Amino acid sequence: MTSPTQNVIHVLQGEYRLSNRPEDMFTTLLGSCVAACIYDPVAGVGAMNHFLLPGGALNDPASLRYGVNSMEQMINALLKHRADRRRLEAKIFGGGRMLPGLRNIGQENVDFARWFLQGENIRCVGESVGGTQGRKVRFWPHTGQAQQALMASHEATELLAKAPPPRGAEDAGTVTLF
């Protein structure tokens, strides 16, 4: 589906990207994290985020690692780029249970994303969430088209281990949740 003129933009943990250019395609790798792909089909503008945890932290109130900040900032950016809130549509991906026996962060992320979209009156037109496999996601923000590929357990572990740490993870006490 990619063409020689396609501009591939990787969305890392704790980031969001926005575009209205037909040649742009966003990609990300997900485990327990969630990516929301939100777009306005009339304005031809869309954005993808990648958040690690649903809530925020008092010592880091603006961090995009948290869904509450990531979703809010991404939606505001879409509105500044001529998206109309009434036309916004969303697709959500991720939220896998990657480490059995521990708290199910993936499900908490999915529950948060659904709750947030409902509270903002943004229609969720598709989702692929949960399970125990990682996902490779591609999103074309100009059209709202999205694709995913499920990863085998060993492939997800290898790829996510190679991913750069999330921004702001400099301190030794940081745990990377993928």
Image: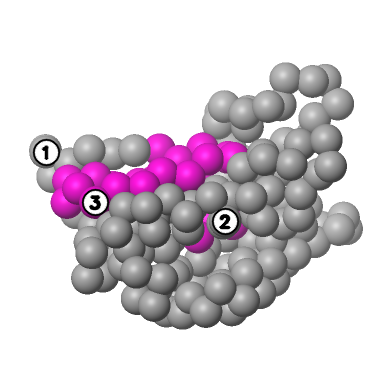
Coordinates of residue 98 in the picture (x, y in percent): 71, 54
Query: Within 10 Å of the Cα at label 3, are there few (<14), some (14-19), or many (20+) other Cα atoms?
Result: some
Mark 2 highlights which residue? 72
Answer left or right for 2 relative to 82: left
Of circles 2 and 3, the one toward us is: 2
Q: In this view, does 47 lie to the left or right of 15?
A: left
Q: Which quadrant is home to the N terminus?
A: bottom left
User: What residue lies at 34% left-to-right and 57% top-to-bottom?
Assistant: 46
Residue 40 to residue 10: above or below: below
- Front residue (pair 144, 96): 144
Q: Label 1 near label 2: C-beta < 8 Å?
A: no
* Residue at x 24%, y 51% (from the top left corner): 20
The kind of secondary structure element at disc 2 is helix
Q: How far apart are marks 3 and 1 (CA)?
A: 15 Å
Q: What residue type is labelled 2?
A: Glu
Q: Could you tell me which secondary element the residue under label 1 belongs to?
A: loop
The stretch in magenta equals 10-36
Residue at point 41% right, 44% down? 17
Q: Is residue 93 visible?
A: yes
Distance in Å between CA atoms under marks 2 and 1 = 31 Å
Residue sitting at x 39%, y 59%: 79
Q: Residue 73: within the magenta?
A: no
Q: Splitting the image into 4 quarters, where does residue 162 fall? A: top right
- For label 3, the residue is 20
The coloring applied to the image is one colour
Q: Are marks 2 and 3 in contact (CB under 8 Å)?
A: no
Q: Which residue has dot 1 on it? A: 5
Q: Quadrant of residue 132?
A: bottom right
Q: What is the spatial separation of the Cα atoms under label 2 and label 3, in whole angstroms?
A: 19 Å
Instruction: Name the N-terminal-most of marks 2 and 1.
Output: 1
The answer to the question of whether label 3 and label 1 lie on touching residues, with beta carbons closer than 8 A, is no
| Element carrying mark 3 | loop
